[in-house]
Image (spheres, rainbow, N blue to C red):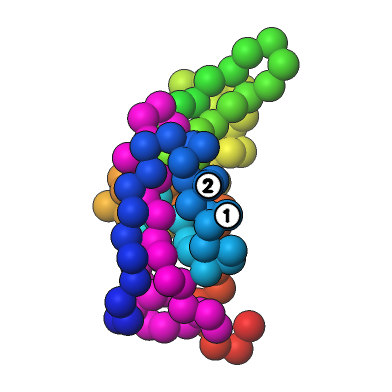
Amino acid sequence: MRSFKHMNARTVDEACALLSEYKGKAVLHAGGTDLLSTLKGEYLFDYPEAVINIKSIRGLDYIKEDSKALKIGALAKLSDIAKSPILKERYKVLAEAAYAVATPQVRNVATLGGNLCQDVRCWYY
C-alpha cells in the first residue's frame, strides 16, 4: 500500500471542504471493508493523496422515515439496514438486499455510504 494523508472530518461541511481541497485526489473512508482492500491491491488508476474518514462525524448512522421520505445515513451499517423494523415492514426488498450482502461479519462493519461509493476492483472493468 502506498502512503497517503489520513484526516478525520468532524462535520459534513469539513468533509466536503477537504474533498474540494484535494480536487479529486481524495477518497472517503466509512466502513473501510472495500476501500482498504482496493488501496492495498492498488486497483485504482489514480491512487489518492488523501483518505478522509467520515466515521468521525456523529449522527450519520440513522434510518428514519418522515411524511416525505425514507432517509438512511451514509454510516448506517448494512446489518442495521437488514434488521431495521421500518425497512422490514415497509421497504422489505431493501432490507433483504442488505441482508444478502457478504457475510454477517462484513455487514456489521460495512456502511451504506461505503457500498455506494465502492469502486470496481476487477482489472477487466
Q: Is residue 45 magenta?
A: yes
Residue range corresponding to the magenta coloring: 35-60
Residue hosting label 1? 20
User: Of all residues shown, which one is farthest toward the left?
Assistant: 105
Residue 55 is drawn in which quadrant?
Answer: top left
Instruction: Indicate the amino acid at tag 1.
Output: Ser
Q: Compared to 17, does 50 lie above or below? A: below
> To which residue does mark 2 refer?
17
Q: Position of residue 94 (x, y in %)?
A: 58, 38
Q: Residue furthest right?
A: 68
Which residue occupies the foreground of this view, 10 or 109?
10
Q: What is the residue that sits farthest to the top in this orientation?
A: 67
Q: Is residue 103 visible?
A: no
| Residue at horizontal 33 percent and vertical 48 percent from the top | 8
Residue 85 percent coordinates (x, y) = 47, 21
Name which residue lies at 54% across and 46% down. Answer: 16
Image position, residue 41 (x, y; %): 38, 82
Q: Amino acid at mark 2?
A: Ala
Disc 1 versus disc 2: distance between alpha carbons? 5 Å
Residue 12 image position (x, y, % from top left) = 49, 37
Q: Under tag 2, what secondary structure?
A: helix
In this view of the protein, which residue sits in the foreground, 47 or 101?
47
Q: Quadrant of the C terminus?
A: bottom right
Which residue is depicted at the point 53% across and 20% down? 64
Q: Residues within 10 Å of mark 2 (few under 14, many from 20)?
A: few
Marks 1,2: beta carbons within 8 A: yes
